[in-house]
Amino acid sequence: MLPPVLQNLLDYYRPLCTFSHGWPGGGESLLAPGTNLLGANAAYLPDNAGESVLSAAKDWAEQHELPPLRVRLGSAGDAGTLRVGVWQTTAGPGALQIEQTSRLHLPRWAGVLAEAYGQPEWATPVARHLATRLEQLPDAALLLAYAGHEAVGALLWQPGGAHLWGTLDAAVDAPLLNAAGELSGGELSVSLPDSSPLSVVGEQTVGFGRLA
């Protein structure tokens, strides 16, 4: 059985992947070829996963020509590290505009997200991938944060969670998460970049590392 924090990430990213495969003991692998979405390109395995499961998960990823990544709780990862927990909305300045945007504007949304992670070349592949996946997610919402007329933050909200987001200005982080939290009734599960100065309730470190 997976720890709750990994199960939460898995439930969020499963609808965003192209392929999934369940493993004995409650583990599951997600793959989204052609994208750089870490959460949708990793194996979610319990700590007691046996060597046969680890080997099979590694082989399955490599068969799809993707790096075999595993999500691990409580440790840093060489492919990325997050802090996951519950965000509780707080009062903040109202100068920033946060809007729920139409899915017709997905390319712009993906452009902001990709730029926030310093990988603008991934904007088009991510937009194309999510355009298909979001057709099956009628309750999901795309949020954009603006500073003046410039879009500086992007977030994909699903009921109860907001793990895929990024900003070009740290001042936008809290207002963007607050807007997502309001959609969930005041609090939601979120992932924070390891470098973020923000904090979440029940914070736990999650690392993405290569399966040996």
Image (spheres, helix red, strand yellow):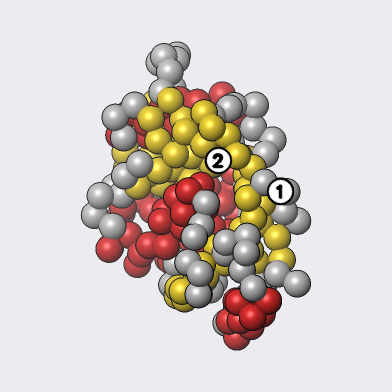
The image quadrant of residue 208 is: bottom right
Count neighbours of disc 1 (C-alpha within 10 A) and say few if under 14, some if 14 to 19, many if 20 or more.
some
Distance from disc 1 to disc 2, alpha carbons, whole Å, reads 12 Å
Q: Look at mark 1 in the image and give the residue it sits on.
A: 75
Q: In this image, 37 relative to 68: left or right?
A: left
Count neighbours of disc 2 (C-alpha within 10 A) and say few if under 14, some if 14 to 19, many if 20 or more.
many
Q: Position of residue 43 (x, y in %)?
A: 57, 66
Q: In this image, 99 relative to 72: left or right?
A: left
* Of callouts 1 and 2, the N-terminal one: 1
| Rendered view: 161 above or below 150 | below
Q: Which residue lies furthest to the bottom in this view?
A: 63
The image quadrant of residue 38 is: bottom right
- Label 2 residue SS: strand
Q: Position of residue 142 (x, y in %)?
A: 36, 45
- Disc 2 residue type (three-letter): Val
Q: Position of residue 152 (x, y in %)?
A: 51, 35
- Disc 1 residue type (three-letter): Ser
